[in-house]
Image: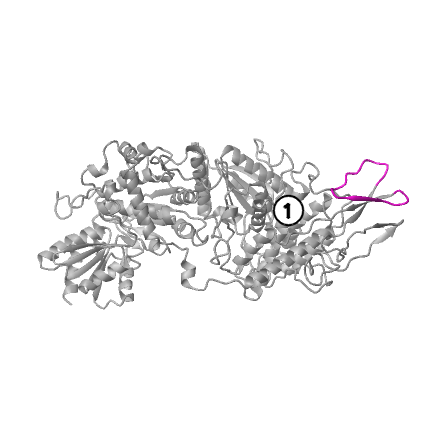
Amino acid sequence: MLSDVTTPQDLDDRFRAALGELGAPAQRHDLGEPLPDGAPLTGAQALALFDAQITSRLLDLAGRWLRSFGEGFYTIGSAGHEGNAAVAAALRPTDPALLHYRSGAFYCLRAAQAAGGFPADPGPDAGTEAPDGPAGERADHGADGDDAGPVARIPEPRAAGDDPVDDAPGRPGTEGTEPGGGAVRPATEDAGREVTSPIRSGDAPADPARPAPSAMPLESGGDAVRLPAGAGVAVDTDGEATADVPPLPAPDPDDAYAEAARDVLRGMVASAREPIAGGRHKVFGRADLAVIPTTSTIASHLPRAVGMGLALERLRRVGNGRRAEGESAPAAPWPPDAIVVCSFGDASVNHATATAAFNTAGWYDHTGLRIPVLFVCEDNGLGISVRSPRGWVEATLRAKPGIRYFAADGTDPVEAYRVAGEAAAWVRRHRRPAVLHLTTVRLTGHAGADAETAYRSPAEIAADAARDPLLATARLLVAAGFASGEELLARYDERGWQVRRIAEEVLDEPKLASPAEVVAELAPRRPVRISRAVADAAARAAGPGTGARAEMFGGKLPELAGPLTLAQSINAALADGMLDHPGMAVFGEDVAAKGGVYGVTKGLRDRFGAARVFDTLLDETSILGLGLGAGVAGMLPVPEIQYLAYLHNAEDQLRGEAATMRFFSRGAFRNPMVVRVAGLAYQEGFGGHFHNDNSVAVLRDVPGLVIAVPARPDDAAPMLRTCLAAAAVDGAVSVFLEPIALYHTRDLYAEGDGEWLAGYAEPAAWAAGHVPVGRARVYGVGSAEDVTIITFGNGVRMSLRAAATLADEGIGTRVVDLRWLAPLPVADIIREASATGRVLVVDETRRSGGVAEGVIAALVDAGYVGAARRVAGLDSFVPLGPAARQVLVSEEAITEGARTLLAR
């Protein structure tokens, strides 16, 4: 009944009934033969697609079955999208893939590919490059078909002989049964020779290890009939010949599809043994399958994919740059001719991150830089319940400049495989981006709680159910003579029992059971290794790299240049980092030719070349996406965000993509990155909240993110070296927040004193001057016994000036420069606060959500019982000109705050 189409049980019943009605082929063919009419698939390959598709479908049903009794935690399935198995088949298992959450069949097929379970291509014409015009284009975009219901059913094992889902070889009670279950139908005799009869539904051969063959009559007097491999011929007394055709081989209970099913089921039940996220999330991912986990339900992984494509092509073309003699350059994790594939839903084409990714890929293509990325849009016509307007997705994708458009019917396995092969070959050959627009249907609804009847008519749902891609593949196999409907039904049932068995096994696996287990892979800190990495870099710079370093600095080594400003110190440290890390690249708006709007990257492009120091388009999402992709591809990216206010346009690339990678891959994938951001306030003569932004709360809220704020030149270089080492050693993601107002500051107390300048340490002193993550710096002014001022950034200079004023009044001050806003240097905070018993927190951000809240909370948590107060910026955006002084912290406010504290 149409009213029942939306239930998963009905989807299963309808599919089983349809398989039973397919009958047997008129003539049987060997699985190694190609499909008729020049289709670029063999029977064996089509059967492999069917195996991937039914495994994915059964996993969907298993997810809802598990959810029905509270043991499953994810019910978004892939039903209707199983045509993406053909996309996987058209790619190589070494092509990195970032997958949409409806990619179950892709994942299963990729697992088979990697295990050698996908048969070889039938000939040179398969997967050939597309001609000049877009291949396989389709203009029709139907509405989507879905099924939803509260409880799903997957085939269960029952007592022997009950029905075709019950028994399998090797299980108790299966004597005299085949994988489909049921009793063996007795063989008949004709003219003294035993001839087997066709297997009906429920029948099984006497030998459970090998299903019985079926009988196929052979016509005489006509053309010769080509028999499948292994076929025998029986001739009766009347001269009529019958071929005993071997049936399909039974699925291996421990094959790659079973392994993939176990991966997915472990994710559904949050098993700690799940291979990629370890029970932290249900994602498609596995390092040995080159499947990189994506945790978003939208297209936020697309900018990363573009970055990966750009990084792969750069590594392929120019290698990893110079390195000190004797040091080898790191290799990219994938072959030089690999392409990146990323899939997403039709509704996501409207999301800002997708727009950014398409625009960036097209922008670079327009400039002549190659990005080998295949975008795959799986278009089922719906975003949960919101319809994609008819023709909108195609029009949108076709209109993307610099991106080649391909389209195919995702419910047709032959067309999907052919066009996906053409698209992949085109991207691989030309190293340019393309999009494959794959029309699909959506069966079983958006997720388990989705009742489609609330927003779709029964006729729409039924129309999509009729386009079930599994049924299309089954019909293809039967029509081409490779299988009967009964055999495919038996195969489906056998896989169903297999999935059910695995589901029951993973239910008993351990879950994450402690906070330590959950956060183990969030952001591991290995300070000893980082310190050793800094020391090793120093040894290289002072030893075998001496000549290269002198050459790169043009003989003017920074340690011999005298006192430097903050900007100059960062510039020198970036150059030293580029020398030591061959995969390091510096990029962002205006960083190359101009050298940054404040000159911080001046001269780097001339020293290291345009391949390692380059300008990007004006889009922060894309800049961070390039960094994310480059990090996964094995580089050490150092992107620059021109102003802190601009970061808010793209902060999810840090929160949702960068910070989650280790967490949701158990460290199998990393995206090491140091994001340089010019920020904070107090610029003179150049204002407004876009250029004087003091909002860092969104960064401090990201688990695992390192936030460094260097105030002094002699801190900036060692802190940057630490961030680079942490990226290389731990895959850390750091934000290096540089106070704009201090970039070119030279004086501290009086004009011309030069006390804010500092020398650049020579390599031999790097190890001794190493600044670990989460360690503060303390200045003593006067007796340093009366009050502790805890601050950072611009607050350090203002607090030191205020402390000098207080010293003239006989008040001794400890000024603590936090240096790291995440993780906060809690031990240093407690120690220095306890030394005086009076704490003034000087927070140049804001009272609400500011850094002072974290500092005072740390004091409270540690049991601090002394006096404490804070001086913070107002909860306001920073206005233009002199009005900024009304909302920002001032030296006078700090001095008065300390006096008030001491008067208590």
What's the residue at 71%, 57% (across, down)? 180
Q: Quadrant of the C terminus?
A: bottom left
At which x and y percent is residue 521? 41, 55
Taking depth in this image into account, of 489 and 68 the one nearest to the observer is 489
At which x and y percent is residue 423? 56, 37
Q: Secondary structure at mark 1?
A: helix
| Label 1 crowd bin: few (<14), some (14–19), many (20+), radius 10 Å | many
Question: How many numbered tags mark residues here?
Answer: 1
At which x and y percent is residue 374? 51, 40
Q: Is residue 602 left or right of residue 399?
A: left
Observer able to see residue 759: yes
Which colour style is shown? one colour
Taking depth in this image into account, of 773 and 300 the one nearest to the observer is 773
Query: Is residue 855 a member of the stretch shown in magenta?
Result: no
What's the residue at 24%, 42% (across, down)? 764
Question: Quadrant of residue 123 in the image?
Answer: top right
Q: Quadrant of the N terminus?
A: bottom right
Q: Is residue 35 left or right of residue 788?
A: right
Amino acid beneath label 1: Ala
What's the residue at 28%, 66% (across, down)? 862
Relative to 265, is 904 above or below?
Answer: below
Taking depth in this image into account, of 832 and 549 the one nearest to the observer is 549
The residue singled out by tag 1 in the image is: 48
Q: Is residue 810 left or right of residue 863?
A: left
Q: Main secondary structure of the magenta part?
A: loop
Taking depth in this image into account, of 580 and 799 the one nearest to the observer is 580
Query: Residues in magenta?
Result: 219-239
Question: Quadrant of residue 524 in the image?
Answer: bottom left
Observer able to see residue 5: no
At which x and y percent is residue 118? 61, 44
